[in-house]
Amino acid sequence: MIATALTAFCHVIAQPTVHWGCDPNADVQRIYFGNHTSHLDFLVTWSALPPARRRLTRPVAGGDYWNDGFIRRYVARHVFDAVLVERRAPGSPRAIAAARASVDQLVAALGTRHSLIVFPEGTRSETGEVGRFKSGLYRLARLRPDVELVPVYLENLNRILPKGECLPVPGLSRVIFGPALAVGADADKHTFLEKARTAVIDLRAAA
Amino acid sequence: MTRLPDITWLMLAAGVLVVLLVASAAGWILHRRVGDGAGRGTVDNINARIRAWWVMAAVFVAATGMGVGASVLLFTVVSFLALREFVTLTPTKPADHRALVWSFFVVTPLQYALIGFGWYGLFSVLIPVYAAIFLAIRIVLEGDTERFIERAAAIQWGLVICVYFVSYGPALLTLRIPRYDHRDASLLLFLVLVVEMSDVLQFVWGKTLGRTPLAASVSPHKTWEGLIGGVVCASAIGTALWWATPFSPVVAAAMAFAVTVAGATGGLIMSAIKRDRGVKDYGALISGHGGILDRIDSLCFAAPVFFHLTRFFYAR
């Protein structure tokens, strides 16, 4: 019920138009990866999915933020069944260990039925430009090659609810799902991440 | 206090119903005649538009029948949706965020609240004076002066077109017109009927007889034939509806002419904005029509003209 209310809220505030470059109802496991500019990103992506797929699709979010305070924790855990991962500044002690643990956590979360929504930039962009992707997506793809990687471009949400603001300015937005990413199994990390990032950026012009 | 809608309103509502039935029948005949041949797309679009008209007419007529509160509420929602489309197309910067939040969640509801209270002295100046000053200084305080004139002007103009102008529609319900008591809902219905019929008839005349472009660089589909045919026919409809208004037939004709011309002006201005921003429609909210601003562009500019003419010559 809270999820329905949040979906309705997101329609009033962001009125997303949805474009699909792949079958929305396909009974496959997917990792939807998109550009990240706003707290609305996950909600808008999730509400664009057919209801039957929504129930099996879990967002991946930063534990430092979403574990902070009762409301956030409740929404993340009980409303959306989010996978909360630990974020550490690159180069800080335990950064590599934390990243490894996160990937293991995501593989476990995928299980045999679930899909995930991830934002591989790791944090919200303030300019609207798509930043560098973190390597977690690459590791995940190597560990679960059977899961489809679907790029998502979210348009205008950075203007509706930008980083640092708590009240939204209503506007129209677009959610563009691309066709599943095709990368050779032997692609190295850098090529893979750059391909994935380009796939997201290219959707901007696609629809 | 609830009162039954008067007979004038009922007759106008029945007229709307008849027009829609005729339109749907015509759409059905077109559909049968065209089949899968050429022109299928146009006919499908016309039928989608007619179906959307049923919904819009039902919501609007019902709201006017339910009184001032319902009409004000409906127009508040319309303004909110229109402003949402306008702002989406406006190149604002992050520094404008707070000013926009105020525009949506304070200025817009306040404008309609003042109309609900019938406070003409304030609702007629709230946006052009107080919002203009407040929002400009709110943007200034963020400290980002790059393109400041464009940003402040665009936000102000968005509020004027989408909220201030539109709010003159329900403001008609607050006029006190001698010997026209309790019939203000009919006046609002008259305005919307004439303006929207003018839009539809301009479309129909333009599609059938349109040859000479009106302003090819602004809107390729608008023609002089469409404009003149639409304005003349809608003025005739307005004249024929004089019994629903406080006007004599001659004045009704003049009023209908004034609002259709103002409406056509609005259509062109809103097309110029779309052209400037490089889009075809303001959105996709109404099937076949585009966004809500594509539907109410004429009404935005006709409502204030109609309100002030009526107020100046008829209200006490």
Image (tube, rainbow, N blue to C red):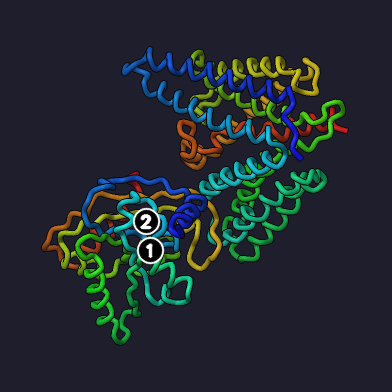
**Letter of the chain that mark 1 sits on in the rendering:** A
Graded by Cα atoms within 10 Å as few (under 14), some (14 to 19) or many (20 or more), the crowding at tag 2 reads many
Instruction: Tell me the quarter of the image containing the N terminus of chain B.
Output: top right
Instruction: Tell me the quarter of the image containing the C terminus of chain B.
Output: top right
Q: Secondary structure at mark 1?
A: loop
Q: Is residue B138 above or below residue B251?
A: below
Q: Is residue B211 left or right of residue B162?
A: left
Nearest to viewer (mark 2 / mark 1): 1
Residue on which disc 1 sits: A80
Q: Is residue A152 above or below residue B56?
A: below
Residue on which disc 2 sits: A46
**Letter of the chain that mark 2 sits on in the rendering:** A
Q: Is residue A86 above or below residue B93?
A: below
Report whether residue A191 is seen. Answer: no
Q: Residue A36, image x and y in percent? A: 38, 62
Q: Amino acid at mark 2?
A: Trp
